[in-house]
Image: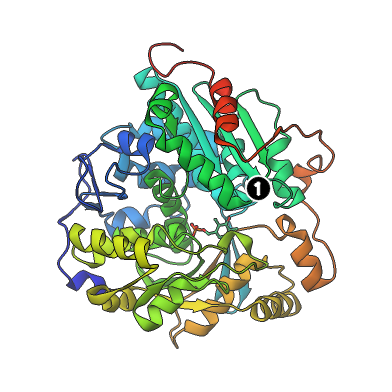
Amino acid sequence: MGEDRRPGPPFFQESLRPVTYISTRGEAASLTFEDVLLRGLARDGGLYVPEVWPVIPPETIAAFAGKPFAEVAAHVIGCFARSSVSEDALLAMARDAYGRFGHPAVTPLVQIDRNRWVLELFHGPTLAFKDVAMQMLARLMDHALAGRNQRAVIVGATSGDTGGAAIEAFRGSERVDVVILFPEGRVSDVQRRMMTTPTDANVHAVAIEGTFDDCQALVKALFNDLAFRDSINLAGVNSINWARIVAQVTYYFVAGVALGAPHRAVSFAVPTGNFGDILAGWVAKRMGLPIERLTIASNENDILPRAHATGVYEMQGVVETTSPSMDIQISSNFERFLFEASGRDAGYIRGVMGALQQGGRFELGPCAVPFRETFDAGAASEADVADAIRRTKAGSGYLLDPHTACGLVALERTEAQSEVPGIVLSTAHPAKFPDAMERIMGERPGLPQRLSSLLTDPERFPVLANDVVEVKRFVAEAARAAPEGVS
Ligand SMILES: *Cc1c(COP(=O)(O)O)cnc(C)c1O
């Protein structure tokens, strides 16, 4: 565990000490878990991280064996949230959230080779791993807002998976209205229908006549209008929200323990876009889970593997691939790792993030060595992805989706001689990307039975111009009440 040699924040063994949160840019006030949950981004532009990293002792990790997923989730999330939320409340939320998954194990492991496993994270309502965190996030937000007698409006832009996961998670919420903007004609049918078929009055999917970047710019404009933002208590649920990261730590523990942790180490390869999911793996390791190798897996949008190899983090144009949820230019959550790797040097973070914004690149400098010691990295070409899907199907009968295939390719490239079990995180069900799968395998995978009505249910969605005034008007109407005092 290379990173433990470097200076870092103090650790504490399990205790009832509340965890407070500090910003990676060092110029925003410390907050509680609930404040961080509701706020998302810090006011200084940074991301929140816990002031100390909780540690779970090996005996407690061993005792996770055989426990229901929801119980492990309540314990793991409780390590970060106990200043704000009781473990009983967390357990009730986790049971409710994970009871909606299509598999009793919630995130089952499937063996695909002698010492290789797939961790299926796609048994939630929208067939992608984002459900695991979003279902919990919705319940945490409702709980926090109820305690404050407040309401909130969530506005987000989606290129596919996040919007559906947010709409499914918040549908029927008493305290939250959700508006998701998606680029008209540029998401898959399955992805669009997951957003447009729910009938609940508090969720709204809106097609924008524009691109995903236009949608993001509209959301940013709404957040930058501070008077508007405060008047309806605007909140965000994108992957920089700390509560989403924390909720993803659970399945690393569940999978690790199933394959012998804490007595035996495991390795993970993680399909990566915004660095959220792999950061959760790093957090699990930091909390005491014995992880030998943690491999960053990219598609052809390979900013992280390039930075790993060269020490220079440099933006390039986005190329479209068969794994669209990883088609991103920069990985926002990387800032959280850099903060730790630099010895929590907020000045360094401000410097490199300023350089990135101005010139599109920065040198990792002192962080290059800890980055390489902590992670492996590999990028899969489109040909690699197709090949991995075909070989795995031929060898084991198992059908990988293109995102998961990137994970397998990266694992194969970085695997050591060791006998440690290798686990590939499967972030999506192949039926979510039927066109890509058809091109690679010659047929479209069928949707799971529980989604059989998705392709025939009536859709409902307005189409709006790429215009801030029009979108603002729509959001204001969707907001059912003022934030304070009414419910
Ligand atoms: C969002 C997503 C990813 C990338 O996850 P990050 O947390 O952004 O790294 C990978 N695969 C799928 C299917 C996704 O939806």
Which amino acid lies under the numbered mark 1 shown in the image of this protein? Gly
Q: Can you give x and y, in whole percent of width and height, for residue 456 in the image?
A: 85, 39
The quarter of the rendered structure image containing the N terminus is bottom left
The number of discs equals 1
Q: Residue at x 20, y 49 (%)?
A: 51
In the foreground, 54 or 163: 163
Judging from the image, the colouring scheme is rainbow
- Which quadrant holds residue 142? top left
Q: Residue at x 51, y 62 (%)?
A: 273
In the foreground, 139 or 308: 308
Q: Can you give x and y, in whole percent of width and height, for residue 446 in the image?
A: 81, 55
Q: On the rendered structure, is 108 left or right of 349?
A: right
Q: Tag 1, which secondary structure?
A: loop
The residue beneath circle 1 is 210
Q: Residue at x 14, y 56 (%)?
A: 10
Whether residue 133 is visible, yes or no, is yes
Q: Can you give x and y, in whole percent of width and height, for residue 4 in the image?
A: 21, 69
Q: On the rendered structure, is 339 left or right of 400?
A: left
Image: 338 above or below 83: below
- Which quadrant holds residue 367? bottom left
